[in-house]
Amino acid sequence: MNSKKKAINTFQRYLSVWVLLCMAAGVLIGHFVPAVPAALGRLQISGISIPIAVLIWIMIYPMMMKVDFQSVRQIGKNPKGLVLTWIVNWLIKPFTMYGIAYLFLFVVFKSLIAPELATQYLAGAVLLGAAPCTAMVFVWSALTKGNPAYTVVQVATNDLIILVAFVPIVKFLLGVSNVAVPYSTLFVSILLFVVIPLAGGILTRMAVIRQKGADYFENTFIHRFDNATTAGLLLTLIIIFSSQAEVILSNPLHIVLIAVPLTIQTFLIFFIAYGAGRMLKLPHDIAAPAGMIGASNFFELAVAVAVALFGTTSPAALATTVGVLTEVPVMLLLVRIANKTKAGFA
């Protein structure tokens, strides 16, 4: 058992290295074996990649099994974490994303990016900013030992808000009069990334506890999935980066330029939400996921909408892909920051 725990700890300790290696592997596969991402790209439902959906289930299924409905019933007694998430995600994040992206793309990097390209990159950034994380946040929450039941409600309520707020916010910020957002993508994403794994996790929890007892479930069964979340994340990165390999390789400088405002935005929103959580005296297992939800993006949705609106090889689609490129390493750093500052919370 000790050797197994040591192997898990070593795997987690060098997670940033594995992430970078998987990103590189994805680009190499996409460049030298393009038939692989082409074949995987054809496996879709309403713009959602079936292989990525399966891997996301692998990532969040262990998190969902930890959901105890006894805890869910108690969430109403501590609504501050939900209100904080809503305010940061919908009244702050889209507008800071627009402001920071506009500043860098049209002012700071004006001599390096043509105006028409900057406009498309800004569109991609806004699509990221208007779509708070749905699936990956369960990974970040798990890595910060977040409250599983509370995280589910935080994410689920944001999914509902996306249905009514995403299009108006994008239209307002970009001045686009006819944005044909694929609502089927929204509904299928919620079904695939929240409803199905949550139902499976709850049924598994109930079945195991009924047969083996709560102690067995908490101390033995759930630990069999300790590395599943990380493995799912790494395989997901390989698929995503293999599908965008040529776009990434053909625009190396612009990728760096786009990454600058996206990275600043990620840090800014995390510290706004995380700091507010501390000021509101929220427990760490609620404040940390609140910061993670705000900082990370629903990149599956952003990429799908960018492709639907502007095309697969468009600059806007490239910007959303850069969002994935920057998000994972930055979020892993924020996870470390959250874990190291846990003592500052009540």
Image: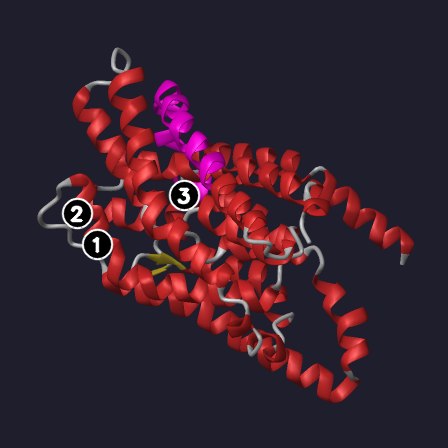
Q: What is the secondary structure assignment of the residue under circle 2? A: helix
Q: Nearer the viewer, residue 342 or 109?
A: 342
Q: Which residue is depicted at the point 39% across and 61% down? A: 158
Q: What is the secondary structure assignment of the residue under circle 3? A: helix
Find disc 1 in the rendering and name its residue: 167
- Give the image quarter of residue 259: top left
Mark 3 vs mark 2: which is more N-terminal?
Answer: 3
Mark whose residue sits in front, 3 or 1? 1
Find disc 3 in the rendering and name its residue: 35
Q: Mark 2 and mark 1 in contact (Cβ < 8 Å)?
A: yes
Rounded to the nearest angstrom, the CA distance separating label 3 from label 2 is 36 Å
User: How is colour applied across the structure in the image?
Assistant: secondary structure
At label 1, which amino acid type do we have? Val
| Residue sitting farthest toward the right | 2
Q: Nearer the viewer, residue 270 or 135?
A: 270
Find disc 2 in the rendering and name its residue: 171
